[in-house]
Image (spheres, helix red, strand yellow):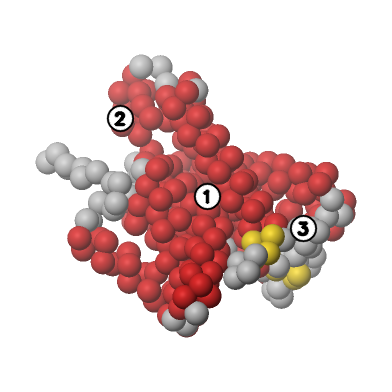
Amino acid sequence: MEMADGGIFVQQLINGLSLGSIYALIALGYTMVYGIVRLINFAHGDILMVGAYTGYFILIRFGVTPVGVAAAFVAAMTVCALLGILIERFAYRPLRSAPRLNSLITAIAVSLILQNGFRVLPFIGPNPRSFPQPETVSMSFDFLSISGIQIAVIIVSLILMTGLTLIINFTRRGKAMRAVSFDMQTASLMGISVNGTISFTFALGSVLAAAGGLLYAFSYHQVSPTMGTMPGLKAFVAAVFGGIGSVPGAMLGGVILGTAETMTKGFLSSQYADAISFSILIIILLVKPAGILGKKVRVKV
């Protein structure tokens, strides 16, 4: 009995790491954008949806082969990067000097436009569609089973998060991002293209959202125009949980939130999963308002 319970625990832990890796990828987009322009991009979850649909049509056209899957990721990332740049250019940039509430309302409006726009497109429609699944090999033990999709999700997420860390810490664009996030005006005076850096940040976050959307669709086997709402909201919770504006915090918050959700489903009930996830956020914000790895910011008056 104890071995069975231990097997269930390890099984749910692996499930949590897989789900948490997806949340972490999506949360990175939230935290990077907030870290630079202090904006909560609530359309980020719908960019995930656009990436998933882009991958869906590529896979339908070329088949679920290694080449088809690679093409789906490349196409989804490219489309979402361009979409992120367009949203920043035409929706957020004109409001950069406006009150933050204006940008927040605009972000919600962009989210609704993307959702309802896809619902009325004749080749998409409002109904969910089954997402093509690749043939994978599962690893089974006495009380444990790891699917090929879970292994792929964790590996791809680790590669993308490692790549993001290298970009931020060791490239000129990454240094520009850090400079703009620290002081936008000073960075501009030092010759850094603030608009270009912000556009690059939106594109980079959208690329990660596209990858997260494909991994989410592979894991849950369907796509729909509203599929990005809940993962996007939970990824935002993960970003705040880890410390909004902190890249390592977003990664940690995503993994913790995904693990907590799957543990709740495995040992309590799936009906309590969302409530407990958001309750953990409330508790951590009461104890540490800046998040686990967030830093307190003093506002000068």
Check residue 183 in the rendering and tell me which mark sits there, or answer none: 2
The mark lying in front, picked from 3 and 2, is 3
- Three-letter code for the amino acid on which mark 3 is drawn: Thr
Which amino acid type corresponds to the residue marked 1 in the rendered image? Leu
Q: Residue furthest right?
A: 62
Q: Nearer the viewer, residue 53 or 112?
A: 53
- Is 186 left, or right, of 233 in this rendering? left
Q: Residue at x 87, y 54 (%)?
A: 63
Q: CA distance from mark 3 to mark 2?
A: 47 Å
- Residue at which label 1 appears: 25
The quadrant holding residue 240 is: bottom left
Q: Is disc 1 in contact with disc 3, using a CB cutoff of under 8 Å? A: no
Q: Callout 2, which amino acid?
A: Asp
Labels 1 and 3: the sequence-earlier one: 1
Q: Earlier in the sequence, mark 3 or mark 2?
A: 3
Q: Residue at x 51, y 64 (%)?
A: 10
Q: Residue furthest top?
A: 190
The location of residue 26, given as percent across then percent down, is 52, 52
Decide: is 81 above or below 140.
Answer: above
Q: Does 16 sit left or right of 128 as displayed?
A: left
Q: Circles 2 and 1: CB distance less than 8 Å?
A: no
Q: Residue at x 40, y 54 (%)?
A: 253
Q: CA distance from mark 1 to mark 3?
A: 22 Å
